Amino acid sequence: MAVAPLRCKCDRRGYNGTVFEQAVMVREHRMNPDRIRVIGEGAERTGPVVCWMSRDQRTVDNWALLHAQELALARQVPLAVAFCLVPAFLGATIRHYGFMLKGLREVEASLAAKGIPFFLFRGEPAEEIGRFALECGASAVVTDFDPLRIKRQWKAEVVARGICPLVEVDAHNIVPCWIASPKAEFGAYTIRPKIHRLLPRFLEPFPTLQPHPFSWPSAAPAVAWDVVLAGLSVDRSVPEVAWIEPGERAARRALDEFVAERLAAYPERRNDPAAAGQSGLSPHLHFGHLAPQRVALAVLAADVPPEARDAFLEELVVRRELSDNFCLHNPDYDRVAGVPAWARQTLDSHRDDPRPYRYSREALERGETHDPLWNGAQREMVLRGKMHGYLRMYWAKKILEWTGSPEEAMEIAIVLNDRYELDGRDPNGYAGIAWSIGGVHDRAWGERPVFGKVRYMSYGGCARKFDIEAYLRAVDRPVIPRSF
Ligand code: FAD
Ligand code: FO1
């Protein structure tokens, strides 16, 4: 469904661009203070500033790092970046750590070129970051925003130590999550106008990270990245993938390729799993190698039809920032308890419906069901680490249909999604699974067995939408470096 571009109502002397173009005309180059919030107080000190990097693992276009430097320059103190490596993060495997650590290796080198040391710690973040801040007498710790429960727990534990102020910066969303809306939004249709209205204030060019003039007292120990990766106690049964190169430089190349080659056809091809119609950017966005704001600026500058630009920005900005809104404001974002009352009620009333097909998690994981399309989507996720977006909806909905309860379905969908998807453990995933199984951000549809009024998707519906055989052939072809 093409999203009608909102005509910006601002009086811009006849400028009639869409609200996205309108926003870029705002040429403020200083950092917008609304991206920043102090989430923990602590002893006032005059020491260095520590940037605790976690979600946004990049040196370019990183509002958290830019603010940390802003503070350090104003105080004329050194600046360092710290990353705390946590083993078995939400079920992550070597597929994820391999990708992430290669990206961090590039971050360490890029920071060194700016005179900013990179410290890698391993263990519990509150312990490691707390100790580091204490030892270096930090005057502030600046960290990136992340709505996930585990991240908020980490930050609460750091704050509880009261070492120094903890400052949080939304480096992931164009419109800071807490500014976009103070509450859980019903759906894209309610958050879209709020985001569109705020874009002129936030969809702005990025300043550049400067070489830092105040040197850290001692050099950070060079990280032996290969040793770190080899020594990681992590599940190594899910192999790394070869079709995508990690790191912020590769991410930028992937963005440039998509904008130049495939953005124009996005509206027609994005929902065709047999076509390379999607951007392929989600792993880079998930690990923060690429700023969504940079993607939006590049898309807006592209010479493509407005409907291609707006269709893509609807997903990248509205849908993605709706997911952060969902995880920030819904404490049960990964549980059936978090779905809307209408959906809980309808799923409950169909709880005892017979399930003509029933599969265990193991059978589903092996892609051994009666449905060749579903099995193919599962294989794509296991082999490539990235299932096509259209099929993720079908995939999760079938898990609801073929397991014993909505709770079992949600648990299996999250476990498999986060075990195999390179972009897993992401607010987009929790929101996508809650949409598919629990009608979150969706409306009620015609009532049917098991689903009740939760939207249903069928094999026949997919067959009418795209060439299933072509998709299955593509899935089983040897892995070729293509994004989709
Ligand atoms: P493109 O179509 O090129 O979109 C570009 C970007 O827009 C994406 O990278 C993403 O940031 C955003 N976007 C696109 N579609 C959505 C959407 N439906 N919701 C939120 N943001 C969106 N996305 C993840 O990042 N991680 C996940 O673990 C994940 N799991 C999902 C599970 C289910 C059941 C569903 C229905 C969706 C899931 N999604 C997830 C959302 C979406 O499918 C992926 O973001 C998208 O397929 C990523 O591929 P792409 O970057 O090539 O997409
Ligand atoms: N963030 C960290 O701060 N430390 C980690 O060790 C870490 C591991 C990790 C592994 C897989 C993965 O998908 C994400 C991981 N993250 C880690 C978090 C990630 O950077 C994102 O912040 C969230 O997953 C998305 O919000």
Image (cartoon, helix red, strand yellow):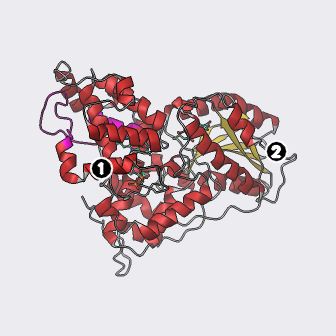
Q: Position of residue 196 (x, y in %)?
A: 37, 60
* Main SS class of the magenta portion in the image: loop
Is 436 within the magenta? yes
Q: Which mark is residue 220?
A: 2
Name which quarter of the figure residue 370 lies in.
top left
**Relative horizontal placement of residue 175, taking residue 264 as reference (left or right):** right
Does the stretch in magenta take in 257? no
Q: Which is nearer the eye, 435 or 357?
A: 357
x, y percent for residue 139 = 75, 43
Single out the mark in the foreground, 1 or 2: 2
Query: Tag 2, which secondary structure?
Result: loop
Report the residue marked by disc 1: 190
State the residue in front, 310 or 477. Answer: 477
Residue 438 position in % (x across, y down): 28, 33
- Residue at (12% x, 33% y) in the render: 447
Q: Is residue 189 something that shows in the picture?
A: no
Quarter of the figure with residue 381 = top left
Check disc 2 and give the amino acid type: Ala
Asked if residue 98 lies left or right of residue 361, the reply is right
Q: Position of residue 63 (x, y in %)?
A: 60, 55
Disc 1/disc 2 C-alpha distance (Å):
47 Å
Given the current orientation, which residue lies at the most extreme bottom position? 14
Is residue 248 visible to us here?
yes
Is the CB–ligand 2 distance for label 2 below 8 Å?
no
Magenta residue span: 430-459
Residue in view at x 66 percent, y 28 percent: 124
Q: Is residue 56 above or below residue 11?
A: above
Seen from the viewer's position, the closer of residues 118 and 203 is: 118
- Secondary structure at numbered mark 1: helix
Which quadrant is home to the C terminus? Answer: bottom left
Image check: 172 left or right of 464? right
Dot 1 crowding, Cα within 10 Å, few <14, some 14–19, many 20+: some
